[in-house]
Image (cartoon, coloured by chain):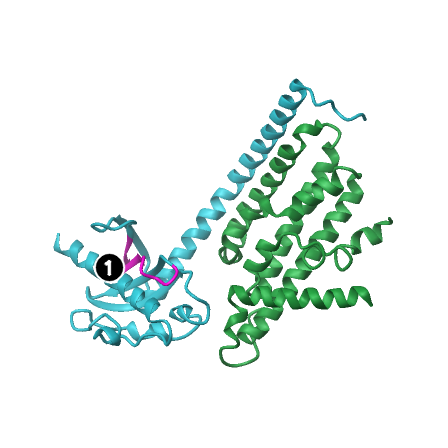
Amino acid sequence: MNQVQNFTKGFIKDNPVFILLLGLCPTLAVTSTAFNGLGMGLATTFVLVMSNVVVSMVKNLIPDKVRIPAFIVVIASFVTIVELTMQAYLPALFESLGIFIPLIVVNCVVLGRAEAFASKNNVWSSIVDGMGMGLGFAFALTLLGAVREILGSGAIFSFKFIEGDGILVFILSPGAFIVLGYLIAIMNRFKKA
Amino acid sequence: MAKKESSFVNMVLTLFVVTAIAALALGGVYNVTKEPIAIAKRLKIKKAIGEVLPEFDSIIETKILPQGGKDSLTFYETTNQGEVVGTAIRTYTDEGFSGRFWIMVGFVNEDIISGTSVLEHKETPGLGDKMDKKKSDWSFQFKNKDLTKYKLSVTKDGGEVDAITAATISSRAFCDAVQLAYDELKKQEGE
């Protein structure tokens, strides 16, 4: 597989949210606005790229039987770094993402890529894979957030273009499931064509 | 490079090294971000106080645990060039539709509410979250109300507060939080 394919597979063919259905907990929970989705996606991308780099560098130094705890420590450290940095320099975003930043640790996309890709490939491919998967995740979350924000509050990226309240259910949790279901259906239609 | 064997010594050593490096890195980041995080928190509090009180230049902070309460309130007594401006109180209620939420209430001349502002909440988006002034101007009705005369409860309960449509529980909880702050303020003055 060449690097271009390696990068673009995260968007459509192997999109973590729409195709692999990984990391759905933050996907459903934080995407009440497009901005939250984007913030969460970019934070996850950073963690994904950094942990892929480290894991692919140390893959031969880690005995097989303890690889999972070692990977988790690496991932958890990067998540904590993101959490502290965001708290310090982007307090507003940190507040709206709240509990879901620490939960990137248990996002299966991150451990999944470390285990399935980075521990078998070289550093460069792992960076590309992390970027592709992370941005694919961010793309999915932003799209989901945008649809929910447009339908739910008549706004996009907090820019209101319809007066009034919008369709409340799309801001609430059931709306996340409904929109995600339709987006997956549309993605599958595209994939077949 | 060959894969390392999963022997006991290898595993212990590897995990030790991995955790030690992680601990060092996190310690470093913590030290770097400690200051900005503290500044961001102070700024947030200062902004919240500014929203409920007129202009001020110094703050005295005290924490008070109400009788039977689960968490303490924070009093911010503010002055402007030596003159007392008023007291902002960070207060909470556990009566919210989704549990506890925190608001800031400002009092001037002891009994008059100068403003309210929601700090953090989990109320239903589109319904209960209208108590946040970013969502609707519902909370402005508390402004300039004198609590010696004003009946602080929703109209359904015989008070004077117009509840948010379809969010009576949130509105009641909001009154509860303001009441708690006021009661504690009175108690402080009594002492």
Left or right of A110 in this view: A103: left
Q: Where is residue A188 in the image (x, y as percent from the top left)?
A: 75, 64
Residue lying furthest right in this view?
Answer: A2
* Residue positioned 52% across, 63% down in the render: A173
Check the rendered structure and report the hue given to chain A. Answer: green
Left or right of B56 in this view: A114: right
Left or right of A64 in this view: B178: left
Which contiguous range is marked in magenta? B74-98
* Residue positioned 64% across, 54% down in the render: A42
Q: Where is residue A46 in the image (x, y as percent from the top left)?
A: 66, 48
Q: Position of residue A64 (x, y in %)?
A: 71, 29
**Dot 1 surroundings within 10 Å: few (below 14), some, or many (20 or more)?**
some
Q: Which of B67 and A94 is in front in this view?
A: B67
Q: Is residue A58 above or below residue B187?
A: above
Residue lying furthest left in this view?
Answer: B190
User: Residue B81: within the magenta?
Assistant: yes
Q: Nearer the viewer, residue A177 or A137?
A: A177
Residue lying furthest top in this view?
Answer: B9
Check the rendered structure and report the hue given to chain B. Answer: cyan
Q: On the image, numbered disc 1 is attached to which residue?
A: B180
Count of number-bearing discs: 1
Q: Which chain letter goes with mark 1?
A: B
Q: Looking at the rendering, which quadrant does residue A182 occupy?
A: bottom right
Q: Looking at the rendering, which quadrant does residue A21 occupy?
A: bottom right
* Residue type, numbered disc 1: Leu
User: Residue A61: within the magenta?
Assistant: no
